[in-house]
Amino acid sequence: MYAIEVRDHIMIAHSFRGDVFGPAQALHGATFVVDVAFYREALTEDGIVVDIGRAHDALKATLVPLNYSNLDDNPAFAEVNSTTEVLCKHIFDAMRDAAKSGALGPGSDGINRIKVTLGESHVARAWYEADL
């Protein structure tokens, strides 16, 4: 299995609903390192998994509406807590759509798995990964 991974980061504000979150029920900020890995069984004719530049551009475009925002005001998170795990799936869905639409360039159609990891701190991270 071959893979490439691209990285960016976001700074957000949010709060959580539910006693399980303790003090995180109050509005607070977070900075996440965002890694997205694209997997495929065989390389393209050009010897790549997918165009790294286009993959990074797709990630950046996905993060623009999240970066420097209060996720409590984002309709995508109106019905759910914007936990790290939920954010992983949100970003995964956008990266899946980018791969399926060909936005990652030639070879997009050969991507068969994506993994999105959000690093919350130097001691905690979450991810979502699935086959396409």
Image (cartoon, rainbow, N blue to C red):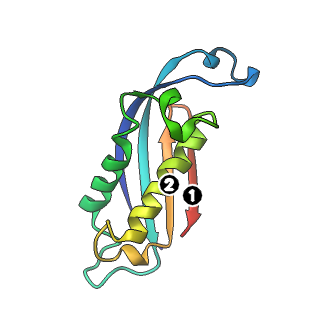
Q: Residues within 10 Å of mark 2 (few under 14, many from 20)?
A: many
Q: Could you say where residue 75 lies in the image, as x and y percent from the top left? A: 51, 37
Residue 3, visible in the rendered structure: no
Residue 91, visible in the rendered structure: yes
Q: Going from the N terminus, do you reach mark 1 or mark 2 first?
A: 2
SS of the residue under disc 2: helix
Q: Could you say where residue 24 lies in the image, as x and y percent from the top left? A: 61, 19
**Type of the residue with mark 2:** Phe
Above or below: residue 6 compared with residue 41: above
The structure residue drawn at horizontal position 27% and vertical position 54%, both measured from the top left corner, is 57
> Is residue 88 toward the left or the right of residue 19 in the image?
left
Q: Residues within 10 Å of mark 1 (few under 14, many from 20)?
A: some
The structure residue drawn at horizontal position 42% and vertical position 48%, both measured from the top left corner, is 35
The structure residue drawn at horizontal position 35% and vertical position 51%, both measured from the top left corner, is 59
Above or below: residue 40 compared with residue 26: below
CB contact under 8 Å: marks 1 and 2: yes
Farthest bottom residue? 45
Q: Could you say where residue 52 lies in the image, as x and y percent from the top left? A: 28, 62
Viewport quadrant of the C terminus: bottom right
